[in-house]
Image: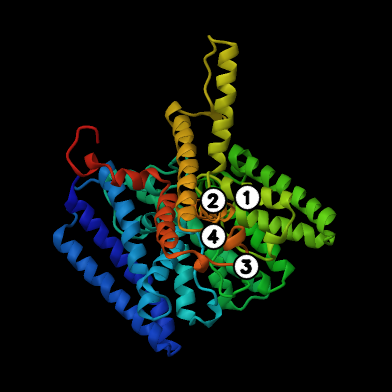
Amino acid sequence: MNRRIVSGLLGYLTLFCGAAMIPPFILAATAEEFNGAAAFLLAIFLCLATTFELERFGGLQGKDNVGIREGIAVTGLGWLLISILGLVPYFAGGYLNLLDSMVESFSGFSGTGATVIEDVEILPRSILLWRSLSNWVGGLGIVVIFMAIMPQFGRGAMFILKAETTGPTKDRQMPRIRDNAKALFSIYVLLTIFCAVAYCMCGLEPFAAINHAMTTIATGGYGIYNGTVGEYGNAYLEYSMAFFMIVSSGSFAMYVVACRKGPGVILKNTEFRTYLMIIAVATITIALDLILEMRVQKEEAIRAAIFHVASLSSTTGFVSHDFDTYPPLSKAFLMMMMFLGGCAGSTAGGLKVARIILLFKFVGLIVRQKLHPNLISNVTLSGCPIDEDVVYGAAKFFFAVVMLDVMFAAVMMFDGIDFVNSISVSVSTMASVGPGFGIEGATSTYALLPSFSKFCACGFMFLSRLEIFTVLALFSPSFWHKSKNW
């Protein structure tokens, strides 16, 4: 691995992190939030100092190309470095202790949206903006956004894009990697603008609309009120949010293609159609359950069902009602939606619908091959044959997610949390949802977790955001030494 290249790219990333802190610093300075302004000024200085040290050690030259090891190192270490720098405003401003600042930063950049702050309404606007910005930057991907606005990485940049893009398939819509990243970023920005305008039309003031738009499109879920969306009691806003959360759960690569070839591309996409069908079934089931079991009015039941199904399946984590009080059937469906997640290539977390489709088709293919030993067939998705490596990769990822869920639950039980709460927190954290059931339910926060569990939660959010294997590769001894296998 070329450490000079990695150091140079990490230097650019920390510079980018410092630039992202300028808007909340300006807001703090103009609003005379002296603690916040000083905290952001210190954070920006630390970003610049880190950039200087990294660039002194390394740097990019004209003919440099990023290989697979450099791509993994830049993505994994870059995400970790920026999350650490991102905690400085919380800690330096005196708003949180060091561990809670770490949880808040990791949760923000990973798009989990789990907070340890029990009263967000006492926070200055600059910190609220930074929380939303961390969600937004981490949603599409720190490195993807960086690639879209900074100089070209070289011909090996595809390894970086692959390392951070979520899902079993990594489709390219344009020949050049940077053009691909710019197209994804453009769609991301446009959706954020449309979302903010829609929220303003629903009655939100501009600051609230912009913050919620960033965290909606990023499927992060940070809010600026303790009651999140339930604070407003606005039916139009809830329907609007549900729509944009579902849109954000679709593949951004699909939207890029749709802009070039027409909206028919979206309707022909097997994964997105399956996702919409799952949303519809879950919404109808939960709405009927609320009407029959809790005697909820029809419109209110439908609104609550579609909102929370969209929120938890997209792993955004917004809350309009306390779904922890729902009947068992509804809670079971919501838990399944959390585990499932959105589509590959979206900002949503979770297992991804594409992997579920591939696994079901793979099992069906195995059964047919048992009945017809000479059968030669491939698993397909959206009419295209899928390589065996991709299918086996989906199976390996499913196994890894289940095992890590079990591991994190075991860690929390060891730390004194009961079985049911441990499972809920584990699934919610690994799926990047945020709220769950029980100890960190719809009206609770991660503040109730013991210190050791909070620290471990940061690690598991790191694993889940980069889809596990990118992070695990960093712990392989051969990764850091010369090897013909790389």
Q: Determine whether the residue tagged by mark 4 lies in a helix, strand or loop.
A: loop
- Residue 83 visible in rendering: yes
Give the mark, 2 or 3, whose residue is nearer the N terminus: 2
For the residues bearing labels 4 and 1, Cβ distance under 8 angstroms: no
The image position of residue 286, as x and y in percent, is 75, 51
* Residue 84 position within the rendered picture, expressed as x and y whole percent measured from the top left: 33, 65
What residue appears at the point 72 percent right and 51 percent down from the top-left corner? 328
Quick one: label 4 or label 2, which is nearer the N terminus? 2
- Front residue of this view, candidates 366 and 439: 439
Dot 3 amino acid type:
Thr
Give the residue at mark 2. 427
Q: Quadrant of residue 1?
A: top left
The residue identified by callout 3 is 443
Residue 301 against residue 393 in the figure, above or below: below
Which amino acid lies under the numbered mark 4 shown in the image of this protein?
Gly
Percent x, y of residue 434: 54, 60
Q: Amino acid at mark 2?
A: Val
Q: How is the image coloured?
A: rainbow
Q: Nearer the viewer, residue 33 or 475?
A: 475
- How far apart are the alpha carbons under marks 4 and 2? 9 Å
Q: Which structural element holds mark 3? A: loop
Q: Is residue 267 visible?
A: no
In primary-sequence order, the first of circles 2 and 1 is 1
User: Between residues 196 and 28, which one lies in front from this camera angle?
Assistant: 28
Residue at the far left in the pictured view? 57
Instruction: Look at the numbered discs 2 and 1 and tell me whether their residues touch, using CB distance below 8 Å.
Output: yes
Is residue 448 placed above or below 403 in the rendered structure?
A: below
Question: Which label belongs to residue 335?
Answer: 1
Residue behind mark 4: 434
| Distance Cα–Cα, label 4 vs label 1 | 12 Å
Label 2: few (<14), some (14–19) or many (≥20) C-alpha neighbours in 10 Å:
many
Q: Earlier in the sequence, mark 4 or mark 3?
A: 4
